[in-house]
Image: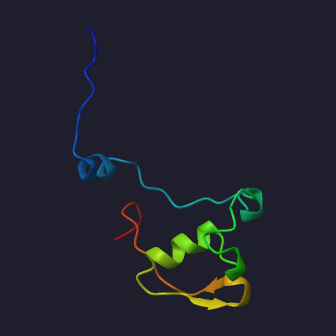
């Protein structure tokens, strides 16, 4: 007998995912050297920081070299 996959709306499917504490063991940002220089190389903001700035619901402080501190973001996949 062939099993037919269940098709759900995204919200329902995400709700069925197991929830666990985040584990960043072995993960460092230095491992991801592929971030490009962003839209304006002169401002020091790489693509990651540009996305963080664009998607912030509470804007972070931006220091020299586009160093971000503070801020707040919402994630569909994070805690409510």
Measuring from the top left, give residue 31's x and y in whole percent. Answer: 76, 57
Task: Give the residue drawn at x 33%, y 50%.
Answer: 14
Instruction: Please say which color scheme the image uses.
Output: rainbow
Q: Residue at x 65, y 76 (%)?
A: 45
- Residue 44 position, x and y percent, is 70, 79
Q: Is residue 42 left or right of residue 16?
A: right
Q: Is residue 9 above or below residue 63?
A: above
Residue drawn at x 22%, y 46% is 9
Question: Going by the image, does 36 lie left or right of 58?
Answer: right
Give me the residue at 39% from left, 68% from top. Answer: 79
The quadrant holding residue 8 is top left
Q: Quadrant of residue 26?
A: bottom right
- Observer-nearest residue: 33 or 44? 44
Q: Is residue 52 above or below residue 64?
A: above
Name the one closer to the observer, 71 or 65.
65
Front one among 12 and 72: 72
Q: Position of residue 29 (x, y in %)?
A: 72, 64
Residue 42, image x, y percentages: 71, 80
């Amino acid at each position: 007998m062939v099993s037919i996959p269940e098709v759900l709306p995204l919200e329902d499917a995400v709700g069925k995912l197991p929830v666990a504490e985040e584990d960043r063991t072995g993960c460092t940002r230095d491992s991801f050297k592929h971030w490009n220089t962003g839209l304006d190389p002169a401002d020091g903001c790489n693509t990651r920081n540009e996305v963080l700035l664009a998607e912030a619901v509470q804007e972070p402080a931006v220091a020299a070299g586009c160093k971000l501190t503070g801020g707040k973001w919402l994630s569909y996949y994070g805690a409510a």
